[in-house]
Amino acid sequence: MGEVVAIIPAFNEEERVAATVTALRSIPAVTRVCVVDDGSGDETAARAERAGAVVLRLPCNQGKAAALAAGVSQTQGDLLLFADADLGSSAGRLGVLISLVQAGQADMAIAHFLPAVSQRRGGGMGWAKGMAARAIHQLTGWQPRSPLSGQRALRRTLWQEVQPLPAGFGVEVALTIRALQRGFRVVEVPVELEHRVTGWGWRDVVHRGRQWWAIWRAVQSCRREAGRVRPAQPAQIGRASQADRETLGQADEGER
Ligand SMILES: Nc1nc2c(ncn2[C@@H]2O[C@H](COP(=O)(O)OP(=O)(O)OP(=O)(O)O)[C@@H](O)[C@H]2O)c(=O)[nH]1
Ligand SMILES: [Mg+2]
């Protein structure tokens, strides 16, 4: 089997990044763990390195999408595992995603985030999640349960075919929509995970606002793209097919 590289976008994650790296390194299929430190002002990079990750340091904060893109472009391997930096030891449960893609059962396997028992309370109001789920369903017909999950195994070819992706926290929703629109097989698998639960302090509210805004922008860009490729209205189809019939007929003749 080829190389499987785990890519972790991280911003000020000194508390949890080492445990996440250690857990990912313990997954037998994972051959390399790359942490992309997105201009953190804390010990994230040093602690990730000490835990055995290859660390890519971005000179300033560029957002989650840019960090993932940098990680993908600076590593090799046909199979990518994206994982958030704050999963801690629960990141060790993500091997199932890799197995599904390696077995050819999916081109992208997403962890449906089952909160561990200790984390069943807390978190936000689900507005961003609801918006993302509705957009994915409307644009692809697929109903996700964890539309914003950052935990996914995917083929590098899939990643390349869905570019360019919107910036920041909108990256996952656009990745799912574009992958499905391009005919890739996407599955969700329940995985019990833990992460740092965002509270309701002012920093948390700002963080949520940034996430919501990025996701909204990503959804709008996917809607615009879908609008550009949406089939013409029935009346237009009628006119177009009438006008094009002879040309198409000639092309058919020519092909035969
Ligand atoms: N590259 C990059 N990554 C970030 C940034 N902010 C957060 N991240 C990382 O993105 C991942 C997810 O961020 P979280 O803050 O845990 O967000 P979340 O779990 O999706 O959402 P919440 O439940 O609201 O906390 C973590 O690995 C973070 O370190 C950023 O500005 N740039
Ligand atoms: Mg988190």
Image: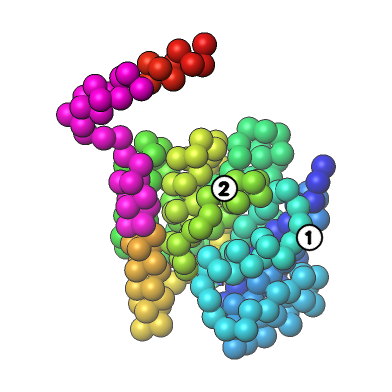
In the image, is residue 226 part of the stretch drawn in magenta? yes
Q: Secondary structure at mark 1?
A: strand
Left or right relative to 89: residue 50: right
Q: Position of residue 199 (x, y in %)?
A: 41, 74
- 193 is higher (above) or lower (below) than 204: above
Q: Quadrant of residue 74?
A: bottom right
Say which residue appears at 25% left-offset and 25% top-offset: 243
Say which residue appears at 45% left-offset and 53% top-offset: 174
Quadrant where the N terminus is found in the figure: top right
Residue tagged 2: 161
In the image, is residue 161 part of the stretch drawn in magenta? no
Say which residue appears at 51% left-offset and 58% top-offset: 164
Where residue 32 is drawn, which disc sits there?
Answer: 1
Is label 1 or label 2 in front?
Answer: 2
Q: Position of residue 60 (x, y in %)?
A: 57, 83
Q: Position of residue 113 (x, y in %)?
A: 51, 52
Say which residue appears at 38% left-offset and 73% top-offset: 210
Range covered by the magenta-colored residues = 220-247
CA distance for labels 1 and 2: 23 Å
Residue 33 visible, this angle: yes
- 192 is higher (above) or lower (below) than 252: below
Tell me if mark 2 has few (under 14), some (14-19) or many (20+) residues whose alpha carbon lies within 10 angstroms of its own.
few
Q: Are marks 1 and 2 in contact (CB under 8 Å)?
A: no
What kind of residue is marked 2? Glu
Left or right relative to 233: residue 146: right
Task: Specify the farthest residue to the left.
Answer: 235
What kind of residue is marked 1? Arg
Where residue 210 is drawn, which disc sits there?
Answer: none
Q: Main secondary structure of the magenta part?
A: helix
